[in-house]
Amino acid sequence: VSASPFDHPLLWRLLGDDEVARHLTAAAELEHMLAFERALTAAEGEEGIVPEAAADDIVARLADFTPDTDRIAEATARDGVVGVEYVRQLREWVGAPNDKWVHFGATSQDLVDTALVLRLRPIIAALTGRLTAVATRLAELSHAFGARELMGRTRMQNALPIRVSDRIAAWRAPLLRHVARIEEIAPRLFVLQLGGAVGTLDKLGDKAAAVAARVANKLDLAVAERAWHTQRDSIAEFAGWLSLITGSLGKIGADVALMAQAGSGEIVLRQGGGSSAMPHKSNPVAAEVLVSLAHFNATLVSGMHAALIHEQERSGSAWTLEWLVLPQMIMSAAAALRSGAELVSDIESLGREN
Amino acid sequence: VSASPFDHPLLWRLLGDDEVARHLTAAAELEHMLAFERALTAAEGEEGIVPEAAADDIVARLADFTPDTDRIAEATARDGVVGVEYVRQLREWVGAPNDKWVHFGATSQDLVDTALVLRLRPIIAALTGRLTAVATRLAELSHAFGARELMGRTRMQNALPIRVSDRIAAWRAPLLRHVARIEEIAPRLFVLQLGGAVGTLDKLGDKAAAVAARVANKLDLAVAERAWHTQRDSIAEFAGWLSLITGSLGKIGADVALMAQAGSGEIVLRQGGGSSAMPHKSNPVAAEVLVSLAHFNATLVSGMHAALIHEQERSGSAWTLEWLVLPQMIMSAAAALRSGAELVSDIESLGREN
Amino acid sequence: VSASPFDHPLLWRLLGDDEVARHLTAAAELEHMLAFERALTAAEGEEGIVPEAAADDIVARLADFTPDTDRIAEATARDGVVGVEYVRQLREWVGAPNDKWVHFGATSQDLVDTALVLRLRPIIAALTGRLTAVATRLAELSHAFGARELMGRTRMQNALPIRVSDRIAAWRAPLLRHVARIEEIAPRLFVLQLGGAVGTLDKLGDKAAAVAARVANKLDLAVAERAWHTQRDSIAEFAGWLSLITGSLGKIGADVALMAQAGSGEIVLRQGGGSSAMPHKSNPVAAEVLVSLAHFNATLVSGMHAALIHEQERSGSAWTLEWLVLPQMIMSAAAALRSGAELVSDIESLGREN
Amino acid sequence: VSASPFDHPLLWRLLGDDEVARHLTAAAELEHMLAFERALTAAEGEEGIVPEAAADDIVARLADFTPDTDRIAEATARDGVVGVEYVRQLREWVGAPNDKWVHFGATSQDLVDTALVLRLRPIIAALTGRLTAVATRLAELSHAFGARELMGRTRMQNALPIRVSDRIAAWRAPLLRHVARIEEIAPRLFVLQLGGAVGTLDKLGDKAAAVAARVANKLDLAVAERAWHTQRDSIAEFAGWLSLITGSLGKIGADVALMAQAGSGEIVLRQGGGSSAMPHKSNPVAAEVLVSLAHFNATLVSGMHAALIHEQERSGSAWTLEWLVLPQMIMSAAAALRSGAELVSDIESLGREN
């Protein structure tokens, strides 16, 4: 038991996921924060908000900026957000006289939200790729064993025989719908956050829209009509998508665990987990983990919806709540897809020969 | 305090909603169950599964069938689903020899899920209409007061002045996105449920797809490649949409309650709630209710995601969990939109004259 | 599907509970509200806050007061709480000149919270009685079948044989602990709510404590050092207790559903639910319902904890959230204990003859 | 944004807690796992289950055992629990011929649950100490400023004046009740887990109870009548307690954030958080964090209640769900108490001079 099972030294290979975790490190966050600041200054230079030479100087200098993370952590305990001290360090690094143009017109939330969105792109790519891969492997299983018979069971009772392909089809179709769903959600999600102190880009005057368009373009993001500081619906919608994924995999896990019960002979798994007390056992561990992760995300999604109540122009409490919840939902979905892929690949046989 | 505040004799006008509640009555459910059974038999007659005369007889007789709801309630305590006794009564009503063709090849879940989906159509129409209406009223408020000044507040502290139009824009944009979202979700939701005992329409043989297409057509629903008995992702996704609505309105409610605090003068509401102890008070009751309903749906959405773990060919426990949760989420969204519309209409003035 | 399955005309016998539902009706609430008002006035008469004759007159007249519930519902939509209009009607009923002494010094929350607490007493008595009854029936089953063998299963796999008594002991012990727990919780719960407008009983001056003591005594409640208008911890703790009950019964339900699977022969149930498509089936409906109710309360308990954030001297939004959640948690626990008692009584045999 | 804010390099000083985190490290877990194994073998030696010399040898050798955590992590991905590989390493370390007596009669869950319970003791001591400390500081504030006036506010509106002591009393009483509650809960929690493969200690024969009593005694734990492998009610009850703590602190946080609004002058805080865009601001960051952590635990408590549905003799999925949820609930409570203590200590003044 440790604070986060996703990076617990003993549990991370059961419950974590290396590939996606990389995008949730502080290092990845800082890298994208820097990308935001450089894009901002460059855009402001191009629009004449920041003197061109100053902009060039800042963009160049920031290329090799390395933050003092301990000092950020310390300051964040007071400021409630990493951006304040981070920007202070950026300005110190750039030095007079151009330091005053660093982060010009922006606010911490622009920085942090944009750095989140930028990381959601590779995360979503990874998750979508895995959804497709699991669906493909399921299609292969259906090809190999689909014609075999399985006892159809309703309300935990034998009902009528079905074919293996029937069961697999019910596992697979939701995964493909999740791929379709994220294509609808993504355009609402990959949107630059840029609003300044109170979301109005007041310091940028009539250049606000032009600067935002340029920053968005540099970061390959869409630009919204205005900042979405307090409009968290697309983030909550994305959280729902993560939990739909874990839920659909949880159904597969529950089914596999039931099929793997002694005597059914309906599934043969390549390997199972051992027991410290019973060496003869072969436990469907990956299947159980899918059920756990489904319940975990089903639990957490509630927190993201509570965070929709984001008062006034910025809610410290609602925004912080997102930080507590969303990364773990991403990790759960990633771990479930990794674990689900392994489970599905471990299936050696399904159903009974007719 | 009563089991359901939505139809509590003392609280329903605060927390309920007449228009949408009509679609969630037992009467509405039974009406759509009957529509399903008639469409099914008609389709089976057209496809030659049921003798044409028998089909005509059944469709005609069912036109004035009235169920004995007490006996359904009694049987449901044993069967776990209303369909078993309901179909028994249908068959009794039709009588020999055609009774054997009633509900032919179908199962209770086909009946109950389709009757749900049919009612979701007017429900979604009502909710979408209200989303648009609230958005329109917000646009009018922005037109009237948008240029006025408001103190922008971040982390509950005065930050910088904004305009009333800035605040309203952040209230309004999510509502319009919710309208766009349901257009994406609806095609996945308005889908006939028809699978028979274990989802394979085994009794309909090679006419299964043709029958399903005809039933769907009669009910103006789409038809899926196969039954979605155990694929609950679109239902959970819809629940998420309901909670996005209440969450977005909860943000408006929280903002209004904060604006209505003494001394701010930033909002003038036509009327507020009284107090049994302090006759001088005018409480922003509708605003508070929006926050309550947002938290309620944020809580409940978790249950719909847990119900995604729908094992084997039909899970009594996961399906029953949906019945406990979804209708209330619908009512919360409906009540929030009703209450939100009233609140927004009660706004007489926003912001301060410049 | 209807707003509340607990009083849905078709589902209430599956998911509701008659005995406990009686305490959650508007009629029961109004009855206890009246008891509060009469006790308050009597106590204020005894302490000389209200002239003795006036107090006697009010207490006498209120004996046959019948509220106009439609007008309460209407006013509650505006006031956010039933107490305002209710008290207005009380005063009208009493008439001049004594009407001014009705509800003297109290506030709506005193009325509503005390009426809740008074109803929790019979509710808790009912639930506790059922916990004991189920535990007793389990002891009988253990006496009858305890020595028989059962395959012990861990991680859904056959592990080693256990005895039926081992399994039953794990079902029973938590139920007895729940009985012990409520004895600890009850003294924190059965506490008079009396604080007046802002919780300080300001209108009662130095008689405040004496009046509170007298009211509490008349209603057989404890008296707190001060009103608990904003201290909702004991209510949330009680909600947790309700969910512990449904969770423990959910474990029994999950076990029974697994034992009832075809072929195991480990359990014989007297009756099961039917199917509209498969007359041969006998579904462990009560067992499944226990799992559903466990998940429902596990979902809802989150809302009661969110309602702990009860700002300032009274939070309309947090308090309303309790009304949306708590009654349903009570009903879930009641229904689960009813259903659990039926399930356990339906067990005709457990385990295999050695 | 990182998987766990509690040990995120940039956020941990805002959202984490050093002292309590120490008990949730893998190192702490392994330390208590070792204590369990040594106590078990010693007890089995004393009872003659394990030959005395073998027991002495094992206990001595294990004193300087260091596990290979990488191999544990790797094996746990397969086994679903750390105990299998851990015990294998223990046996390897002890070597023939005594290796067969290591972990004799026990199972991984005995090891992991007992190691959890042993760490809950210092965790609870820390949390309880902080509850008392915050309550004491609140008493001091009440002593210093209690007689001052504050506007009492109900439903976010000015109601009537109260004294600062009234508000503080409502903050403080729940904290003291939480201290009382844990005294009731602790005896149900500090209980040895020892059941062997299927909870029956089958390998220990008629010495089972005696061995359990000795192990419990060595670890200063109580001993239950039987293993609580599947009886998770006391763990869920403890989770509820953690969320009551964060909820009560969330109310304080919400109140402080509202008091700290511009113009009220009702509270003076020693320091607030800065802003990257508005150097003049002083944000009530700690107050907001309390609200976030309250919502986070309110969200998570639902997962612990879902985990009560712990099927058969051990549920991999329900148990794993606890690992995902409980450590974070502990950290949230710890962080909230740390942050709450800081916030309360930062209060320089409350209320207005009369």
Image (spheres, coloured by chain):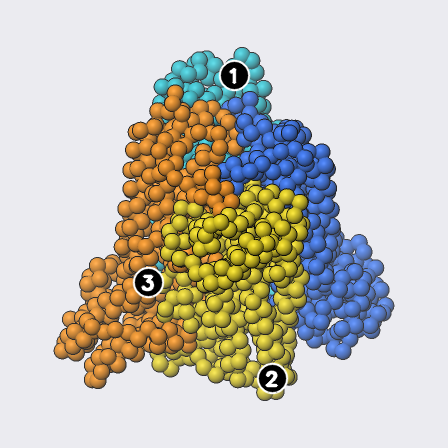
Chain colours: A cyan, B orange, C yellow, D blue
| D39 lies above or below D274 | below
Amino acid at pointer 3: Thr
Displayed quadrant of residue A77: top right
At 58% across and 50% down in the image, what residue appears? C50
Which type of secondary structure does the marked residue at label 3 adopt? loop
Q: Do we see residue A156 in this rendering? A: no
Please give the residue where the numbered disc 1 appears in the rendered image: A100
Please give the residue where the numbered disc 3 appears in the rendered image: B25
Name the foreground residue: A316 vs D192: A316
Q: Are marks 3 and 1 in contact (CB under 8 Å)?
A: no
Q: Position of residue B85 (x, y in %)?
A: 33, 76
Chain letter for mark 1, please.
Answer: A
Please give the residue where the numbered disc 2 appears in the rendered image: C145
Q: Are marks 2 and 1 in contact (CB under 8 Å)?
A: no
Name the foreground residue: B1 vs D31: B1
Which type of secondary structure does the marked residue at label 1 adopt? helix
Name the foreground residue: B346 vs D13: B346
Chain letter for mark 3, please.
Answer: B
| Badge 2: residue crowd in 10 Å (few <14, some 14–19, many ≥20) | many
